[in-house]
Each structure stands twice: as C-alpha cells, then as structure tokens.
Image: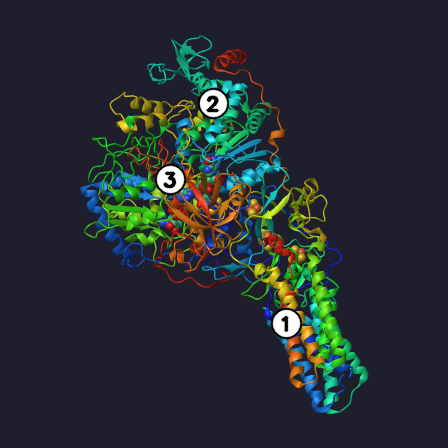
C-alpha cells in the first residue's frame, strides 16, 4: 500500500508582523502572517500578556474584516437626503476643508454648539485631549450606555472596577461567582481563566437568567430574575453577617468600616488634617485611620457617632434581607441562597491559605505572609445595565470586601493603573470659552454637588445632561441621550454632531426607529433639526447613511494606534503593559487613520496642545503624537523604551519608540515586584513601584469605601443643605438614589408587561461589525427570540413560529425558538445581529435584514409617563447608565412570516457590490 | 488506497472537553483560516454576503440536556473528523483519494485524486466531511497534518490550529497509542467517550463528558448563626475582636 | 438524503438497462440482426444513460476515471468496473447477435451474471452505509435486483415471466419499505449516542452551529412528510407493478406495452425518489433531524 506524497512542512509565510487585534476591545496580541505583502493568516501571539497565544473567533476572522467589501473607500459628502445613503466621493482636502469650515466658527463663537462623542474608542486619552483643546463641553465616549455603573461603583467603592480593570486570581481561586456576564471585554482572559479553574476542578457559579456560554459551563447555574441581583447579594451578606463569616481583620485595616460617621450629618468624622477618624483599640480614643500602629475598632463609637460597620450590621441583619424574604423576588429558593452563602464562607475561610511573601502596609507595619481567600467574583452588564445597577455593583463590592477577597491571593486583583482612589481622579469640567481650551478634563468623579456640570442658572452645561441632578455621578457621560437631547433642543440646540465609531443610528441607540427619525427631522425651514453631522467609520454601517460628511477610517491592520496607560491599557494584575497597532498592510483605498485626521484638523484649527509657541503644528500624524506627546514631563502615551530606550514609565520621548515596540511584538510589559503583587492599595512596595512607573506622582494608599461619603453629600443637598440643591421635583429621587450604603430598589413594573427581555453578546460577533465578515456571519446570520418553557408551552409555540413582542414603547415581530435553561419570566436574543437593508455591503435579502432584528426598537430612552407630568429617563439615577435590561414586554404567537418588523427601509450602499463567491487564498 | 491499515504506529487525535467548552467558535474560525490558506483547496464560501453557505471542517453545535430533575443544561459540542480506526469514509472511496495514514492514523483526502462523488461524506456518521463547492473536492479535518510536523513552525506551535487557539483549553491533541500521553490520561481520568459507538467506527477522538452540575445544595453544611439581630451581633463582634 | 435527479436517474435507468441486458444474455428474447440491435441498443442506452447521469453527481468529474481503482474495497468502484465489464461482454454478445447472427451462450450467461452483479454493486453502494439505516439492510440489494429483473423482463417482452416478476418486485419493494421504516430505530443511533449526553438526560438541539446553510444539510438532511410519503408509496407500487401487470393481462397491443413500460419506469422513478428522500442519515440527528 502506497500513500500519496505529502509535504508536511510547507512554508507558512514570508514574514510575521506582530500587532494588536481590534475585532473587539480585548486587544489581544496577534501574529499576522504575510505572503507577498498580503495578509494570509492571523493567529494569537504566544508572548502577549493578554491572550498568551489564544485567539477568539473574531480575532481569527480579522482577515475577513480587513478585506470586507463594506470598507469605505474615500471621504464622502452626502448628496441625497439623510438616511438614503446617497453620497459622492470627495478628496481629503475637500473633506477637511468642509470640517474646518464647520468647526472653526463654532470654536470661535460658541464651543457649546459642537458635540463630539466617540464610541468604543481605544484612543480616549487622545480624543479627550483633542476635545479639551477644542474647548466644547460636550465630549464623552460610550461608557454611559455601556457599563458606567460598573466603573463608577467600583471606583467609588474600591478604587477600581471589574470590567477589564481587574480580574480574579485565576491561579489560586477555588470558587468563582460570575454575575451577569455573557462575554465581557476581557473575552479571552475570562475564557482562559475559566479553563484554568476547570482544569483544577475549581467551582464556578454562574448567576444569570440565561444559561449559555460561561453560564453553561458553570458548575452551578443560578437563574436569577433580572434586576434582582442586588437583593440576592444583600441576602448573601445577611447570611454571612449572621454567621460572623467576615474578615474582621481586613475590614478593620483596609476599609472605612471602622471610620466614625457623624450622627448628625452622616458625613465621616475627620481630624483637622482631613483624615478619617477611627477608634484605636489600643487606646479607645479616636485616631486618624493611617496613624502608624493604629488598631481601628470596627465596633468603635464616639459620643453617639458610630462606625460604618455598625451601620452595615444594622442594615443588613434586617429580616428584610433574609433568604426567605427575598427568595420569591429573586426567583432563587431560600435554601439555595443559604447553601451558596455557606459554600462561599467555607471556601473563603476554611480553605484560606498563605503565601510566604512578607510585605509592608501603608501604616509601616510589616506582615510576614499574605493570606489568601480563594473566593472571587466578576460581574458586568447583567448587573450594571439596570436602573438599580450602580447600587447592585456596590453591593457586590461590599460582599467581596466583607469576605476580605479583594487584592488578596485567590481573590479579585486590580490591573494597573488601578487601584486608584476617587481622590486621584479628576472632577468633571464644563466651563467653555470661545477660542480656548476647556478648563479641565470633561469627565471625572464628582465629590459632591459642587462638582456638577451645571451652568450658573442651574441648567445642564452639557448636551447629554451628564453630571446633573438627574444623574450626578455620570462619570462616562450619556452618549445615548445626545441625539434625543439635540433633537429636542434640551438643554440647548447644537450645530454640529461629530461622532466616531458608534453606530448611533442603529444598535447603540435605544428607540432605534425614533432616533432615525430624529436624525432626519427638519424644522419649519426644511433644515435638519440637527444641522450637521460628521462621522468617522471604517465600514458602510447604518450610521454612515445618516451623516453629512464621512471621514473614512482605515482597518485596524492599516494604521497606528496606541493602547495607553493613560486610558485603557492591557495590564495584568502582575504587570503594567501597553501596546500599539501599526500599519502591517498598506491601505488600497483613499482612507486615513481617524486619529491622524484629528491631528490634521487640530493643525488646521491651530488647537492649543497641538500647536507650538511658534504657531507651528507639533505633530504630523498620530504616530508622531504617540512618540512625542507628553502629558506630564516624562509621561507620554507609551510607557516602554523611553529616554535613551532603557526607561520604562517615566522618561523623555524617544523617536525610536515605535520601532522598539514593533521589535518586541507590539507591546511592552513591566512586571510588578513580588512583594507588591497583592494588597496594592495598601502595599508600600506597590505604591512606590507605581510612583516610579508614573502611575501616580506620590503614594496614595486609601481605604475601601464601604460607605461612600460623596453620595451622602448629595443626600444632604437633597435634604436642603448647602448652596447647590436639587430642584424640588428631584429631591426625593436624589435622596433615595444616593444612599451611601448599598441598597436595592425594584424597577418600576406594569402588570401589562410581565416578561423581562434581554440581549446577550454572541462570542463570535462584535456588535454590528461582525455581520460584514463572511465567515462570522455564517455562524450568526439571524437571531431568534428565545423563550423559556413556561412561555413556549403556555402560548403553544411550535418550531417555526413567530411572535409579536410589545413593550410600552413599541412592537416587533420576530422568529422564536425554545430555550429550557432560562429564567421562566425572561426571553432573550443575540445582540445587534439585525441589519438595515443595504448596509454593510450585504445583499438585499441577507438574513440579517430579513430574519434578524434589534430589541432596541422596544427600548425607549425615556420611561413611560407615570402621571407626575415628568418623563424619567430610562437610566440609573446615580450614573445615567442606560438601563437596557429593565425592558419588560408581553408576547403573542403569530404564524411564520418572511421578514421581521419593523421595516426600517433600506439605504443605498456607498461601496461596490460584494462578490458572490469567496475562496480566499493568498497563495504560495 | 482505500484499504485501512491494520494498525497505525501512532494514533493522533483530539480530546474535546465538554465540561469546559464555552462555545466560543474560536476553533471553528482558526480552522477555517488555517485550512483556507494551507492544505489543498481553500475552504470556499458561496454567496458570502447574501445567503451564505461555506465549507468548514469543524463546527460547534449546542444541545440542551434535560435531566430527570433540575434545570436543563446546555452543552457546547465541537465536532470535526474523529479520525476513526475503522473509517467507513475511507473504504467506500472509489478513487483512493481517501486514506488513513499508516504512521499516525490521520484520515486524509488526496485532492488530486478526488472526483467529488460525496460517498465518503455519506459514509461518515458524524458529518465530518464537506464537499467544497468551488473546488469540487471533499474537505475534511486534516488534524493539521501540515502544522504538527512542520519545522517551519516553532516546536510549541506544532499542534492543530484549533487546539492552539482554544481560549478555554477545551481541546487537547496527542497520541492515543501512547497510554501515558496527556490525551490518554485525560481520557482515562475523565471517562472519555466515543460518539455513536454502535456505528462501529472506533473513533480516535474522545469527548470528556460534562461534570455533574447544580450540586451546590448538597455541598457544605448551612451556616450557624452567631446572632440574629444587630445588638447580639455587636456582642459577638466585641468578643471576636478580642480574639484577633 | 437529498433526492438528486442524477442519482435517481442513475439507479433507475441503469437498473432497467442492466435488467434488460441480463435477459438478453440468456437469449430472452433470442434476437438477431436489426431487432438485436434494437434490444441491445435500448439496454445500452439505459445502462449507459444511467451511468452518464451518475457523473452529474460528481463535483470533480475529471477524476472520474480514477473511480475504477479501488474495486478491492469500494462498492462504487466495483460498480464501475462491473458496469464496464458488463457492457464489454454484452457488447460482444450484441455484435455477435446483430452482425454475425450468433449467440455464444456462455458469453451470454457471463454477461447476465455481470449485469446482475452490476445491479448488486449499485445496491451495495447504498446498502453498505450504516449511516443510512434504511438502506443498510439485505432488502436493499434484493429490491434493486428484483426491480431490475422485473423491469428487464418487461422490456425484454417476457410477458409471462414479467407479470409474476413485476408483482414480486412490487412486493419486495413494499417489504423493503416496511422493513426500512424500522431500521433507524433498530440501528440504535440516537442523539443520546451521537452526543454521548444520554447519561445526563434527554438532549435536544439548542442552537445550530451556523445559521447559514451547508453541504451536510443540503445533502443529507431532507424531510418528507409521512402522509405524503404513504401516498407516494402507493402510487409508486401501482405504477411500477400493478399498472404494467394489468396492461400485460389485457390483450396485447403495442400501445399497452408501451404504457406498461412507461408506467413501470415512472413507478420506479417515484420509488427511487422515495428511496433517497425518505432515507435518514444519522448525521441529521446532530441537526435535530429524526
Ligand atoms: N439592545 C441592546 N443594545 C445595546 C446593548 C445591549 O446590550 N443591548 N449594548 C450597548 C453597548 S454596551 C454598546 S458598547 C453599544 C455598541 O454599539 P456601537 O458602539 O454602535 O458598536 P458597533 O456596532 O460596534 O459600532 C461601531 C461602529 O464602529 C465602526 N468601526 C469598526 N471599526 C472601526 C474602525 O476601525 N474605525 C472607525 N472609525 N470605525 C470603526 C463600525 O463599522 C460601526 O459602525 O451597543 C449598545 N446597545
Ligand atoms: N464577542 C463580543 N464581545 C464583546 C462585545 C461584543 O459585542 N461581542 N461587546 C463588548 C462590550 S461593548 C461590552 S459592554 C461587553 C459586555 O459584556 P457583557 O457584560 O457580558 O454583556 P452582555 O452580552 O450584554 O451580557 C449581559 C449578561 O447579563 C445577563 N443579565 C441580564 N440581566 C441580568 C440580571 O439582572 N442579572 C444577572 N445576573 N444577569 C443579567 C444576560 O443574560 C447576559 O448574559 O462585551 C464586550 N465584549
Ligand atoms: S478577544 Fe478576540 S476580537 Fe477581542 S481582541 Fe482578543 S482576539 Fe481580538
Ligand atoms: S469521523 Fe467521519 S470522516 Fe472522520 S474518519 Fe470517522 S468516518 Fe471518516
Ligand atoms: S468524494 Fe472524493 S474522497 Fe470522497 S469518496 Fe468520492 S472520490 Fe473519494
Ligand atoms: S485539527 Fe486542524 S483541520 Fe482539524 S479541526 Fe482542528 S484546525 Fe481544523
Ligand atoms: S475554541 Fe474551545 S471553547 Fe471555543 S468552541 Fe472551540 S473547543 Fe469550545
Ligand atoms: Mo459596551
């Protein structure tokens, strides 16, 4: 028997170029295999700190994104009506002329007339710098509709959040509880982490109304009723407190649990230097919390002023939080709640372990060991995208801190630049002056009413009404309110809306049909109500059709990018790390990297920060900015190879820097010394290392804020104290929302709409981009609405049926499917699969347009009227986070049909027709 | 070439861990990417931007399993060629294009001989073969035969593309003929199973069953209260602090 | 399985053709000259036509010639080899009969044996497939052979033989169906065994691996309604057996004979459509079939 000859060792490629993936915000390292100058194959970079060689489906499919027929080819000027998609291609000179002619007068006359909002922007430190130098008050990225609850609750409570800003100690944890996550930004690291736990046989508990993905592999699935996690968590806290299963030592040393609360004002007691006061157990007398040798007393009292811890015990030991009291609301049997609490306590305390690593805390005390508590938590939008999300996230942090599992071995760990207390963050700024930069960064963390972005007359300073009494801690802005506010002229009219990589006419808007209407509405003169829209996209998205001027971006393999410590770097709990993208392939179209376009616009507008004393431009393009910009002396966008090439963190700009990144695989890693690996907020070695790296200018140890004093400051204003107080109609709401201890409030409910409706991210799709990808769209080309058995059987659904789903705001007609592993009151679908006809270079009858749909049509940015004459916004009253997951609906069965409703019409495609066959082989 | 070798020196194959697979589809696309650019004809797609249909060598299904009591469980189920010992797809092939390698047991299609009759795909119970419409030849998982021996790749990369990429570590590659190999040990420890044993194909690839789910209620004993209300709690706290 | 016209035509026409050649090999009818040419011509046309139809099923026909290589293991290869041998031997017989007015009986017998073996090979292409339990049964070759023989007898004008043979073929066809209906269950392949998840509980497909279509779904997952198929079975047997027999029972008439042949052909085509369309491939289980 003879086997055919076979070459088992063919050459793989001519060259490997290392850069960073952009198919989602996880930012894995990729090896791009090149053949004859073309991209032939993409795999994960084994040396990369984020993904260590693995790559998700989207990452591997990057080649199809890079070659997608939907790529824009040249700047576009709208020639048909908005929404039609009729454009003419123009030159860059003309495009920049137009943009300049719109922006220059605004800057000169009234910077307020410009709103610049960016989507899942990976260059926020740069775009915000641009915006600050332009000087309009209206800038934010997408965090407000994404997960600001998660970010803000984490930062106010413990100086860092879940999101991708920290992660469980995957190597040591033995019990991992995951709340409300389908995928998250840390896509590959979470999968790798779960894989590690599974390999070790550690237990994973998934708390999620829907049992798919991570929740499907979880050892235990808790199919909670949406919006009730806060109550469930507080019930776990109740159980743990009742059994004394809390880490008293940790609470006393590292949190504000022992800090005394002024019984009259509810503010924290402080000494003259402003230091919080605790009772020192050695003396029984008050002392500043950080005094060397102090032993803070959790049970301390002083003249009727009690410690935070006593307030906590008072509140959560209440029978209101007993498992039996919450079981029905949460949809979790009381015994199961008790069993979970018992298991958490068992692992945290009975399986505690020690690492023989001495360390010194901020009080100067030397510890011989690090105590590990191998219970860890992670959560994301499932708990944060509710109107009670901020407090729910706070509750979860309270739980992990009571257990003493934050920043200890086996628990949750921060990634630099976190931990970083609220006090180290800026406050928001909004004072706009013609022809001047803004008085400070747009976004920040208010410490009290004094930091709200209000005009002298008390009206909102920002178009999105961020940092107002409606949502005081809206640390990421409210991108989802920009279009509707601009359309309503409330709080004022704008002239130009400038958007970057956010599909705001489609999947990132609530009330999609309504938003399309607002974007096309005209006034009595026939002029558009929102007069001018500039948009940067790389592809022919739905939003493109609604803009007047399109600035086409390159693909991620064709430009420079900077994943910087100044915004959202790629650090690990054990290392600081940042990365770049660089043009591994040359564009074959007349497109430019958007950041470079912003530099060019800044140069034309002679923006300060971009212009030297001699009036000459400081930077030629984004790569130039990446290497030469200094935010503070010695600190620039990239941390690696600074100065003469040997400095990390701080150092003079180095013109070779990008080349050194490329040589190193596109990233830079700086490891944290062993002594500094845990207890970072209180660890002297970590604080010193962070200062050396330029993360802080001086050590700033701090206490975890179980009791959030800034929230109490807002409550006091609502009680009538201070010179900035909420308007009468908002007082009660502000008071209730700004509870300084975690609380749970049910979402408003209407018996006519009994069913919760959710979306989840499919792991193989990124929002709306995935659908232009020839490989990925074969996996998710349409999305049924999944119904639990109770509803499936109850309504007599059969495979192939369709349904009409109605919310107080609208109705959609969609195909349905059965899902047994689902909370009985919940239905769901995959997010952002549905597409508008004509978008993304897809065929007219593409399944995404005929059988795909968006749930967004059912979600309104305002809640239904409640008879108080006000329309409350559908968002968290603390942060303004869009409450996507508070949606309630009812459902009716319909016979099969051929296309989903509503029909949003079609747009003309500004790009050539896509090919009808693919056999993509670059060749030998 | 359609006679099967009586034995093969090595038995290379995959272990797929159904307890761990999160259904992310990474292996599906890594496979598509590698095998489009490498072994044989590219994996083509028809009407890729309309109503698409393409060739894939690895696909991830998902199933809901309803146990007698408790809630339904969801299992992600990746499936590619299992490189069967008694591969019916090989023996049916009239042209000899399909064969099982003597040295490692990998089942391959020699595309220069294949006439695209499809019979091998009919013979495979697992749906592991797909006829490529553009090239007219049968495509199937090659176990990345052009990676695992490829000295143009660093040694650590000489494993299948799907295994290398799997973020959850749910895929394992190795030699089942070696009882001490990682894959043999995993199979033994975790009761690795055959798909459709009754078909008599003797698959080489093994599947590790999901571990028991929803067991928490039967785990730890419930907590004993130290106090039922705040004052009692503070008394306990005082004593506990004394002991610190 | 997808009832592709190419394979339906292939099995139907070649079965009929080789059936006729089998009778001609036995000298039934013992024809020479022009009528030999006509009979053999029809036999060849059907057999070759069927084989040609089968090549439409090939995605890469340029390699079709290689299909003769693996006769040791592959029934499809054997079918090809057997068909060529049959056509060669039958061709010699035809030349002898048509041009030399001779019939070499042993050569004829050989061609009969080969023709029947070819039909058997065709049947075995399907019957060997464990993956399609309905086909994987002894009745598949019995049915192919009885149908080919009955059709051959009909075409060969062996009226008295044809009548019982047609009834037999119809009966065998019915038994094949009835037995076939039980095969999937008997094979014991279920979604439980396919996924190995039966130990946990009852599995049910949740989400398919792709919302787009693929080769497997088009080729192997084809669903026919039960009611529909029962009706078609009756029509098929009526056409392939009952109608021809009635035609033959009536006083001979060329039109009736033609009608008998036509009905038989149509009946077999319907039966073969069902043969494919009703055949459930076990892979369908993975996609929620069966
Ligand atoms: N129903 C429902 N709606 C939701 C959510 C939900 O859970 N449920 N989630 C919300 C959340 S958290 C988010 S973050 C939003 C996301 O929604 P969007 O921010 O709208 O996200 P994308 O669809 O990714 O759109 C981004 C746009 O960026 C473009 N783009 C891609 N690559 C590039 C590039 O390199 N350069 C430029 N300039 N443009 C590029 C894409 O073509 C696309 O038009 O959706 C929100 N909407
Ligand atoms: N593949 C892929 N990865 C992505 C993205 C993508 O589009 N595709 N988008 C990125 C972006 S912008 C973001 S913001 C992140 C978001 O990542 P995730 O936070 O994972 O966001 P979602 O997919 O919206 O998943 C929310 C989960 O919360 C659950 N959930 C909803 N309500 C509740 C509740 O009340 N309680 C509990 N416990 N669970 C609930 C839902 O069932 C769902 O599983 O993902 C990022 N990563
Ligand atoms: S998770 Fe996937 S898409 Fe996101 S950066 Fe990593 S490889 Fe790319
Ligand atoms: S899985 Fe299918 S294709 Fe692979 S060897 Fe087994 S029978 Fe052949
Ligand atoms: S399709 Fe190709 S490999 Fe398969 S049986 Fe036919 S000739 Fe052989
Ligand atoms: S081993 Fe290679 S060919 Fe086979 S499924 Fe994995 S990647 Fe695809
Ligand atoms: S890559 Fe791994 S986890 Fe993802 S679907 Fe494949 S086997 Fe499962
Ligand atoms: Mo997001």
Q: Which mark is residue C235?
A: none
Residue C63 found in image quarter = bottom right
Question: In whole angstroms, how far apart are the C-alphas of marks 3 and 1?
Answer: 62 Å
On the image, numbered disc 3 is attached to which residue?
Answer: A145
Specify whether A58 is left or right of C264: left
Q: Are marks 1 and 2 in contact (CB under 8 Å)?
A: no
- Mark nearer the viewer, 3 or 1: 1
Which quadrant is the N terminus of chain A positioned in? bottom right
Q: Which mark is residue C269?
A: 1
**CB of residue at label 3: within 8 Å of ligand 1?**
yes
Secondary structure state at the residue bearing disc 1: helix
Neighbour tally class for label 3: few under 14, some 14-19, many 20 plus, Cα within 10 Å: many
Question: In whole angstroms, how far apart are the C-alphas of marks 1 and 2?
Answer: 75 Å
Q: Is residue A484 visible?
A: yes
The residue sitting at the front extreme is C250
On the image, numbered disc 2 is attached to which residue?
Answer: A320
Compared with residue A776, is residue A274 higher up or lower down, i.e. above or below? above
**Residue at the (65%, 53%) spot, across then down:** B82
Q: How many numbered marks does the figure carry?
A: 3
The numbered mark 3 sits on a residue in which chain?
Answer: A
The numbered mark 1 sits on a residue in which chain?
Answer: C
**Residue at the (44%, 42%) spot, across then down:** A890
Q: Are marks 2 and 3 in contact (CB under 8 Å)?
A: no
Residue A270 position within the rendered picture, expressed as x and y whole percent measured from the top left: 35, 16
- Mark nearer the viewer, 2 or 3: 2
Q: Are marks 3 and 1 in contact (CB under 8 Å)?
A: no
Foreground pick, A579 / B216 = B216
Foreground pick, A366 / A173 = A173
Question: In whole angstroms, how far apart are the C-alphas of marks 2 and 3?
Answer: 32 Å
Compared with residue A612, is residue A583 higher up or lower down, i.e. above or below? below
The numbered mark 2 sits on a residue in which chain?
Answer: A
């Amino acid at each position: 028997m003879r086997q055919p000859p076979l070459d088992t060792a063919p050459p793989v490629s001519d060259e490997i170029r290392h850069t960073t993936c952009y198919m989602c915000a996880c930012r894995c390292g990729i090896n791009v295999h090149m053949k004859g100058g073309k991209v032939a194959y993409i795999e994960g970079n084994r040396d990369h700190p984020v993904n260590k060689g693995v790559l998700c489906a989207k990452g591997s499919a990057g080649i199809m994104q890079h070659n997608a027929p939907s790529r824009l080819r040249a700047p576009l000027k709208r020639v048909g009506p908005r929404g039609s998609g009729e454009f003419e291609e123009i030159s860059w000179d003309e495009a920049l002329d137009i943009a300049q002619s719109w922006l220059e007068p605004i800057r000169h006359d009234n910077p307020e007339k410009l709103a610049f909002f960016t989507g899942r922007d990976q260059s926020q430190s740069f775009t915000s710098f641009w915006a600050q130098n332009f000087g309009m008050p209206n800038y934010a990225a997408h965090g407000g509709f994404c997960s600001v609850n998660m970010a803000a609750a984490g930062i106010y409570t413990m100086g860092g959040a879940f999101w991708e800003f920290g992660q469980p100690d995957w190597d040591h944890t033995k019990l991992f509880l995951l709340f409300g996550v389908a995928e998250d930004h840390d896509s590959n690291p979470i999968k790798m982490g779960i894989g590690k736990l599974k390999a070790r046989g550690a237990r994973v508990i998934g708390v999620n109304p829907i049992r798919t993905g991570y929740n499907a592999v979880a050892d235990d699935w808790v199919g909670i009723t949406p919006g009730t996690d806060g109550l469930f968590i507080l019930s776990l806290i109740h159980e743990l407190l009742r059994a004394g299963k809390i880490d008293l030592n940790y609470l006393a040393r590292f949190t504000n649990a022992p800090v005394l609360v002024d019984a009259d004002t509810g503010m924290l007691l402080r000494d003259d230097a402003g230091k919080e006061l605790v009772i020192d157990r050695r003396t029984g007398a008050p002392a500043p919390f950080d005094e060397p040798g102090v032993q803070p007393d959790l049970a301390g009292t002083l003249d009727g002023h009690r410690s935070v811890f006593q307030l906590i015990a008072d509140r959560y030991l209440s029978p209101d939080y007993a498992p039996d009291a919450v079981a029905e609301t949460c949809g979790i049997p009381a015994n199961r709640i008790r069993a979970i609490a018992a298991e958490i306590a068992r692992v945290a305390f009975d399986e505690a372990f020690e690492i023989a690593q001495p360390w010194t805390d901020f009080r100067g005390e030397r510890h011989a060991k690090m105590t590990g508590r191998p219970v860890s938590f992670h959560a994301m939008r499932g708990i944060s995208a509710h109107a009670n999300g901020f407090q729910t996230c706070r509750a979860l942090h309270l739980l992990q801190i009571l257990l003493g599992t934050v920043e200890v071995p086996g628990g949750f760990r921060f990634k630099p630049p976190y931990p970083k207390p609220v006090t180290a963050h800026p406050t928001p700024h909004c004072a706009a002056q013609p022809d001047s930069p803004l008085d400070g960064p747009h976004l920040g963390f208010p410490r009290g009413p004094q930091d709200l972005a209000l005009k002298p007359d008390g009206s909102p300073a920002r178009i999105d009404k961020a940092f107002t009494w409606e949502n005081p801690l809206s640390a990421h802005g409210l991108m989802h309110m920009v279009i509707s506010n601009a359309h309503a002229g409330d709080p004022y009219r704008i002239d130009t809306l400038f958007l970057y990589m956010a599909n705001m006419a489609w999947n990132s808007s609530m009330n999609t049909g309504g938003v399309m209407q607002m974007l096309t509405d005209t006034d009595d003169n026939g002029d558009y109500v929102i007069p001018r829209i500039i948009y940067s996209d790389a592809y022919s998205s739905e939003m493109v059709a609604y803009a007047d001027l399109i600035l086409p971006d390159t693909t991620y393999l064709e430009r420079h990018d900077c994943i910087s410590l100044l915004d959202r770097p790629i650090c690990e709990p054990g290392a600081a790390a940042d990365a770049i993208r660089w043009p591994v392939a040359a564009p074959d179209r007349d497109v430019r990297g958007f950041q470079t376009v912003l530099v060019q616009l800044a140069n034309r507008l002679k923006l300060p920060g971009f212009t030297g004393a001699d009036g000459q431009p400081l930077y030629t393009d984004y790569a130039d900015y990446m290497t030469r910009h200094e935010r503070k002396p010695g600190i620039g966008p990239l941390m690696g190879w600074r100065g003469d090439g040997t400095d990390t963190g701080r150092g003079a700009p180095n013109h070779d820097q990008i080349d050194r990144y490329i040589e190193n695989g596109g990233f830079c890693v700086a490891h944290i010394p062993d002594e500094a690996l845990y207890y970072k907020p209180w660890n002297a070695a970590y604080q010193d290392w962070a200062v050396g790296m330029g993360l802080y200018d001086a050590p700033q140890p701090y206490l975890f804020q179980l009791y959030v004093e800034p929230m109490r400051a807002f409550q006091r204003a609502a009680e009538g104290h201070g010179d900035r107080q909420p308007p009468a109609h908002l007082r009660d709401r502000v008071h209730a929302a700004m509870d300084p201890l975690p609380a749970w409030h049910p979402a408003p409910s209407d018996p006519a709409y009994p069913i919760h409706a959710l979306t989840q991210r499919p792991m193989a799709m990124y929002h709306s981009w995935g659908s232009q990808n020839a490989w990925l769209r074969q996996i998710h080309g349409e999305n049924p609405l999944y119904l639990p058995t109770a509803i499936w059987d109850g309504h007599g659904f059969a495979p192939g049926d369709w349904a009409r789903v109605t919310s107080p705001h609208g109705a959609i007609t969609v195909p349905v499917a059965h899902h047994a592993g689902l909370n009985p009151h919940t239905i769901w679908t995959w997010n952002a699969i549905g597409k508008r006809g004509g978008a993304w270079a897809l065929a007219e009858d593409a399944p995404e347009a005929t059988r795909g749909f968006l749930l967004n049509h059912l979600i309104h940015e305002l809640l239904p009227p409640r008879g108080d004459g006000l329309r409350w916004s559908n968002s968290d009253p603390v942060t303004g986070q869009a409450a996507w997951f508070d949606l309630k609906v009812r459902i009716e069965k319909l016979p099969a049909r051929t296309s989903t409703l509503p029909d949003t019409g079609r747009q003309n495609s500004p790009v050539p027709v896509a090919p009808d066959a693919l056999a993509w082989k670059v060749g030998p | 070439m359609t006679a099967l070798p009586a034995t093969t020196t090595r038995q290379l194959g995959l272990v797929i861990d159904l307890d761990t697979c999160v259904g992310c589809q990474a292996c599906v696309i890594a496979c598509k990417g590698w095998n489009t650019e490498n072994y044989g004809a590219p994996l083509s797609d028809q009407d890729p931007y309309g109503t698409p249909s393409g060739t894939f060598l690895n696909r991830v299904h998902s199933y809901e399993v309803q146990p007698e009591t408790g809630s339904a469980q969801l299992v992600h189920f990746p499936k590619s060629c299992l490189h069967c010992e008694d591969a019916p797809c090989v023996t049916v092939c009239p042209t000899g294009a399909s064969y099982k390698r003597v040295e490692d047991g990998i089942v391959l299609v020699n595309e220069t001989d294949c006439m695209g009759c499809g019979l091998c795909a009919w013979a495979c119970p697992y749906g592991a073969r797909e006829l490529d419409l553009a090239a007219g030849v049968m495509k199937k998982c090659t176990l990345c035969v052009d990676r695992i021996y490829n000295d143009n790749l660093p040694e650590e990369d000489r494993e299948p593309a799907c295994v290398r990429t799997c973020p959850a570590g749910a895929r394992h590659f190795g030699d089942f003929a070696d009882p001490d190999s990682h894959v043999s040990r995993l199979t033994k420890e975790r009761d690795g199973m055959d798909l459709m044993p009754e078909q008599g194909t003797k698959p080489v690839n093994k599947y590790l069953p999901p571990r028991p789910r929803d067991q928490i209620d039967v785990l730890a004993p419930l907590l004993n209260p130290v106090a039922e209300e705040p004052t009692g709690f503070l008394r306990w706290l005082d004593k506990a602090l004394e002991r610190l | 399985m997808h009832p592709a016209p190419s394979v339906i035509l292939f099995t139907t026409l070649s079965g009929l053709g080789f059936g006729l050649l089998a009778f001609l090999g036995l000298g039934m009818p013992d024809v020479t000259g022009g009528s030999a040419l006509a009979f053999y011509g029809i036999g060849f046309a059907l057999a070759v036509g069927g084989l040609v139809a089968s090549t439409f099923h090939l995605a890469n026909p340029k390699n079709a010639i290689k299909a003769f290589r693996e006769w040791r293991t592959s029934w499809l290869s054997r079918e090809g080899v057997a068909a060529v041998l049959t056509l060669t031997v039958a061709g010699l017989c035809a030349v002898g009969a048509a041009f030399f007015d001779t019939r070499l009986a042993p050569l004829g017998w050989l061609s009969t044996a080969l023709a029947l073996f070819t039909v058997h090979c065709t049947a075995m292409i399907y019957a060997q497939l464990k993956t399609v339990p309905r086909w994987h049964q002894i009745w598949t070759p019995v049915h192919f052979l009885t149908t080919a023989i009955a059709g051959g007898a009909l075409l060969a004008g062996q009226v008295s033989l044809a009548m019982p043979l047609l009834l037999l073929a119809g009966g065998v066809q019915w038994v094949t169906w009835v037995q076939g209906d039980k095969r999937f269950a008997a094979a014991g392949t279920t979604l439980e065994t396919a996924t190995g998840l039966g130990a946990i509980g009852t599995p049910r497909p949740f989400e398919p691996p792709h919302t787009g279509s693929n080769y497997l779904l088009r080729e192997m997952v084809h669903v026919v309604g039960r009611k529909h198929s029962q009706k078609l079975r009756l029509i098929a047997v009526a056409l392939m057996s009952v109608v021809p027999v009635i035609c033959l029972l009536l006083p001979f008439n060329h039109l009736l004979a033609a009608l008998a042949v036509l009905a038989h052909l149509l009946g077999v085509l319907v039966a073969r459509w069902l043969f494919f369309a009703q055949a459930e491939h076990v892979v369908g289980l993975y996609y929620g079939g069966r």
